[in-house]
Amino acid sequence: MLKGKKILLGVTGGIAAYKAAFLVRLFVKEEAEVKVVMTNSAKEFITPLTLSVLSKNPVQYDFSVPGSGEWNNHVELGMWADVMLIAPATADTMAKMAHGICDNLLLAVYLSAKCPVYVAPAMDRDMLKHPSTQQNMKQLVSFGNKIISPSYGELASGLIGEGRMEEPETIFETIQKHFSAKLPLSKKKILVTAGPTYEKIDAVRFIGNHSSGKMGFAIAEELASQGADVILVTGPSSLTIQNNSILRRNVESADEMYRECMKHFDEVDGLVMSAAVADYKPEKTHSGKIKKHDQELQVKLVQTKDILSELGKKKKKNQFLVGFALETDNEVANAKEKIKSKNLDLVVLNSLKDTGAGFEKDTNKITIIDRNFISTEYSLKSKMEVAKDIVAAMVSRMKK
Ligand code: CTP
């Protein structure tokens, strides 16, 4: 979600300045571009070198580059940022911001910034309570700045009270939310299933399939990067999630996947059922290992629940259901039939006839058909790009 976002971090001189290092790391880990501007007194608490190494950018703190006669362009820095965050913000800096005082580079950048500005105050309890600080904070809010309220706890002075800078993780989430609020799926919660299911024969054997989970994981990531709250219910898969906001639930069998989906279905706005759910499971599972003997081994299979059909029956008007159809013959006709029989809004058709499409591959070739039977064929693409096409098709059809 923060990938490529330009974050300008202003650091002022308080003990919480050391937490700026954690903040920079959190942003950089999410592939945001981070530049740091600090006051001279902040340098007493954390070195520019530390923040420069972590942000992978030079840190600015003077109007000119020392010794070079070169000007640090505060207007450019202010224009560069998608968001400016001042953390920690001391009482002194907030007072200056409230009154347009501009006696250091950070304040000049603040005055030049065209982007939204977040301020995370940090100071001692009584400084925060002082009417002048309270007045200044109100003033800052009236200018459109957003205050990330300090939290309660033990302060550097030993006093207990409000004034601690909010934890880096919470500040990070606030900035993440700032960006996700503008995304098309920011108010949506979506359930995604992925991977195969394993149906146990005995203690060591199972019936499974070759699904890797790549398609479902890519869809979950894309939905999350479009701002959705994602619950990913996955069968056994070695894949890992990149976006920390995705809630992952691991299951093994079709029955477990059914139960986990049922648990979440009422709370979601949509479902993408990309798991390759087993259609059959052994009628009974042996608790130990079945020993080899001379006769043939017969394993009776019974049908699993069709999860998508069951959820299709439960579907409410405002819920959006996406199913997959893996076909070898009469692809389009069968896919359309699945839209009707499973009460879907979209079906993503994979034809096993297409080279490069299918299980364990990094590419896929799909056709998307909606409930009005309007179909769109896509070329062979990476599964990440296919996920983007599927999510775009959802976004354009889902109720806002
Ligand atoms: N599906 C499901 N539960 C099952 C089987 C399939 O939820 N027990 C879902 C799949 O995740 C997919 C859709 O149903 O989104 C269609 O799966 P597919 O295997 O193409 O078709 P089936 O319904 O199983 O029918 P058939 O195998 O006869 O084509």
Image (cartoon, helix red, strand yellow):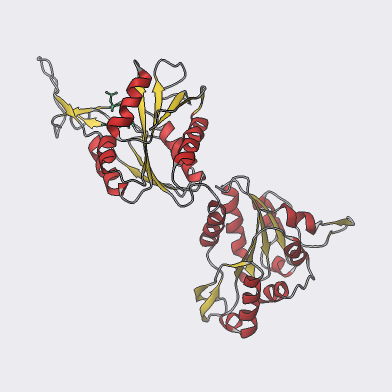
Residue found at x 14% / y 35%:
287
Q: Is residue 89 visible?
A: yes
Q: Quadrant of residue 125?
A: bottom right
Q: Nearer the viewer, residue 298 or 349?
A: 349
Q: Quadrant of residue 61?
A: bottom right
In this view, 357 is above or below 78: above
- Tell me how many marks there are: 0
Q: Nearer the viewer, residue 332 or 96?
A: 332
Q: Is residue 210 visible?
A: no
Q: Nearer the viewer, residue 99 or 400?
A: 400
Residue found at x 43% / y 32%:
215
Q: Position of residue 141 (x, y in %)?
A: 62, 71
| Ligand number 1: quarter of image | top left
Q: Position of residue 193 (x, y in %)?
A: 36, 38
In this view, 263 is above or below 60: above
Check the image and name the residue furthest to the front: 372
Q: Position of residue 189 (x, y in %)?
A: 41, 49
Q: Is residue 128 left or right of residue 239?
A: right
Residue found at x 32% / y 36%:
235
Q: Is residue 388 left or right of residue 280?
A: right
Q: Is residue 275 left or right of residue 12?
A: left
Check the image and name the residue furthest to the right: 69
Q: Nearer the viewer, residue 398 or 135?
A: 398
Check the image and name the residue furthest to the left: 295
Q: Position of residue 13 (x, y in %)?
A: 68, 70
